[in-house]
Image (cartoon, rainbow, N blue to C red):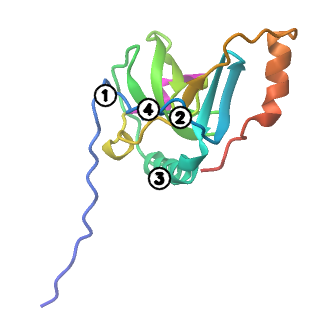
Amino acid sequence: STSIQQKEKPTETFVPINKAFPVKAIETPSREEVIISWWVSPHQFYTQLKTRFVEFERFMKEIQHFYHKLPLQQLQLKIGSFVMARQRKDNIIYRARVMACNQMLRKYKVHFIDFGNQYTVTSEDIWQVEKRFADFPIMAHLCGFDGIVTNYDHLYIIDRMDKYLPQAEAY
C-alpha cells in the first residue's frame, strides 16, 4: 500500500486593521548610527537604525514573497487603518497606515511606517496585514533639529537631499 503525503498549505492569519504596529522606543540620550530614509525638512525627517537594517531587509523580502500572489481583498478602510500597501512606482509592498480616504474614488493616502514617506494608492494596492508581519517594530523614527534656520528654499533643500537618501531596493 502506498501512502500519499499531502503538503499542508500554511494557514494565513490576518490581524484586524485597527491593530497598530509596535514601536520600539529608543533610550535617550543615546548615540546610534542611522540611515536617513525620508526627508521633509531639517525639522522633519525619518531615520532607520543601522543595527536593525540586515534583519529589516530579510523582513521586506518575506513581505514581497508572501504578498506577490495574494489575491485582492475587499477591505473597509478608514483613517488610521494599518495595512500593507504597494507603491506602484517601485512595485514594492510596504507596511502602512491610512492617513486619508476617498471612498468614492477608492483612493487612500498612506504613510509608509518603515520609511516615513507618504503615497496615494488605490484599493487594488492594499492588503490586510498577515500576523507574521504585524509584530516587527516600526523602522522609521521621526527626527528633527530644533532651532535650525535656513537661508534656502524648502524645495531646493529637498532636491539636494535626494542623493543622500537610499534608493529603492529590489526586495
- In the rendered image, is residue 89 in sight? no
Measure the alpha-carbon separation of dots 1 and 4.
18 Å
Q: Position of residue 88 (x, y in %)?
A: 62, 33
Q: Could you tell whether 111 is left or right of 148 in the image?
A: left
Mark closer to the chain start, 3 or 1: 1
Instruction: Find disc 1 in the rendering and name its residue.
Output: 19
Q: CB under 8 Å between callouts 1 and 4?
A: no
Give the residue type at disc 2: Asp
Q: Secondary structure at mark 4?
A: loop
Q: Position of residue 6 (x, y in %)?
A: 23, 71
The residue under the point 82% across, 19% down is: 157
Q: Are marks 4 and 3 in contact (CB under 8 Å)?
A: no
State the separation of the CA atoms marked 2 and 3. Answer: 15 Å
Residue under numbered circle 4 = 25
Looking at the picture, does residue 113 appear above or below residue 151?
Answer: below
Q: Earlier in the sequence, mark 1 or mark 4?
A: 1
Residue placed under numbered mark 2 in the picture: 114
Q: Is residue 156 left or right of residue 110?
A: right
